[in-house]
Image (cartoon, helix red, strand yellow):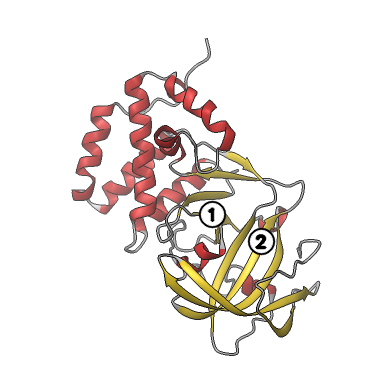
């Protein structure tokens, strides 16, 4: 007989888990982090090989008349120790990417600003290993995961095959870790610890996917940078004026394109204004 998910990854007993979660807000920070570590250790990580044609977006605000001139300006900073973020402890280098331009604008809190927007893609024939936080709960509640697609029904059947009490504990754990990652907006101590525990548990995990806290229904990706160029390339880069209208919708104008990147990573700009919101694609994808 095939072992169920919870037989392979025994969760905490429901009563013990619920008691720990109810104590969580009153516990010391050390105790909170210890519980997160314990739950990640026992929780099955639903890692997925992820590739395809999707474009991922990275945005940053620019000053007046600022035109970044190096490819690293599109990516993560290398001139300082990384600050703590939602999905990275201090010193742990992560590149944050968004599923759509509007998500990227929301994440950097654009109201009215000049913005540098880069599009990145996973290179043809390459895949990355992604863990979507909260995927079990999303499938159980809606029938379809954030990233699972047509596999969602198979995962749902896997959950249904488990002992009901054990499945309940697995789902509560999934929801708790998701909440710790998404809801921690003050200092990111707990959310970054969730991410650290996930990356430490599976060294092959190259990215964590999670719901945007600022753009309802959108997805962000926290991508490890150590081997970034093994799988990724740059598809395009644009400078634009962005104005927030309301509720995560934006007007974009005065677009200017990067029309080439040298082998050494120097950006070449066409500063003629484009009002059509078109793309100048870098083909093939740029890599070092």
Seen at 43% across and 39% down, the residue is 138
Q: Position of residue 58 (x, y in %)?
A: 58, 66
Q: Which residue is mark 1?
A: 221
Seen at 70% across and 77% down, the residue is 257
The alpha-carbon separation of the residues under discs 2 and 1 comes to 12 Å
Q: Is residue 28 left or right of residue 175?
A: left
**Relative to 68, is 230 above or below?**
above
Q: Is residue 19 left or right of residue 65?
A: left
Is residue 190 visible in the rendered image? The answer is no
Q: Position of residue 242 (x, y in %)?
A: 52, 77
Q: Of all residues shown, which one is farthest toward the front? A: 276
Q: Which residue is mark 2?
A: 120
**Count of labels shown?**
2
The part of the image, by quadrant, that contains residue 141 is top left
- The residue nearer to you, when weighing 83 against 100, is 100
**Relative to 243, is 175 above or below?**
above
Q: Residues within 10 Å of mark 2 (few under 14, many from 20)?
A: many
The part of the image, by quadrant, that contains residue 166 is top left
**Relative to 164, is 95 above or below?**
below
- The residue nearer to you, when weighing 6 against 140, is 140
Q: Position of residue 217 (x, y in %)?
A: 45, 52
Is residue 3 visible in the rendered image? The answer is yes
Q: Position of residue 231 (x, y in %)?
A: 70, 53
- The residue nearer to you, when weighing 121 against 43, is 121
Q: Is residue 232 left or right of residue 82?
A: right
């Amino acid at each position: 007989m095939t072992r169920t998910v919870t037989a392979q990854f025994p969760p905490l007993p429901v009563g013990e888990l619920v008691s720990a979660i109810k104590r969580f807000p009153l516990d010391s920070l050390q105790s909170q982090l210890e519980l997160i570590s314990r739950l990640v250790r026992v929780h099955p990580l639903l890692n997925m090989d992820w590739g395809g044609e999707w474009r991922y977006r990275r945005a940053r605000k620019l000053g007046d008349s600022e035109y970044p001139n190096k490819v690293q300006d599109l990516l993560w900073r290398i001139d300082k120790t990384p600050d703590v973020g939602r999905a990275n402890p201090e010193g742990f280098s992560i590149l944050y990417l968004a599923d759509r331009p509007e998500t990227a604008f929301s994440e950097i809190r654009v109201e009215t600003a000049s913005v540098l927007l880069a599009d990145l893609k996973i290179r043809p024939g390459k895949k990355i290993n992604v863990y979507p936080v909260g995927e079990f709960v999303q499938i159980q509640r809606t029938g379809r995961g954030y990233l699972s697609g047509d596999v969602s029904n198979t995962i749902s059947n896997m959950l249904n095959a488990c002992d009901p009490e054990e499945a309940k504990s697995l789902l509560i754990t999934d929801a708790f870790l998701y909440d710790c990652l998404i809801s921690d907006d003050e200092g990111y101590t707990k959310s970054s610890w969730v991410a650290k525990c996930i990356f430490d548990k599976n060294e092959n995990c190259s990215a964590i996917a999670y719901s945007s806290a600022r753009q309802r229904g959108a997805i962000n990706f926290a991508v490890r940078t150590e081997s970034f160029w093994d799988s990724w390339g740059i598809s395009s880069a644009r400078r634009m004026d962005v104005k927030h209208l309301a509720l995560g919708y934006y007007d974009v104008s005065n677009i200017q394109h990067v029309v080439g990147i040298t082998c050494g990573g120097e950006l070449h700009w066409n500063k003629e204004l484009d009002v059509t919101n078109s793309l100048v694609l870098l083909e093939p994808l740029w890599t070092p």
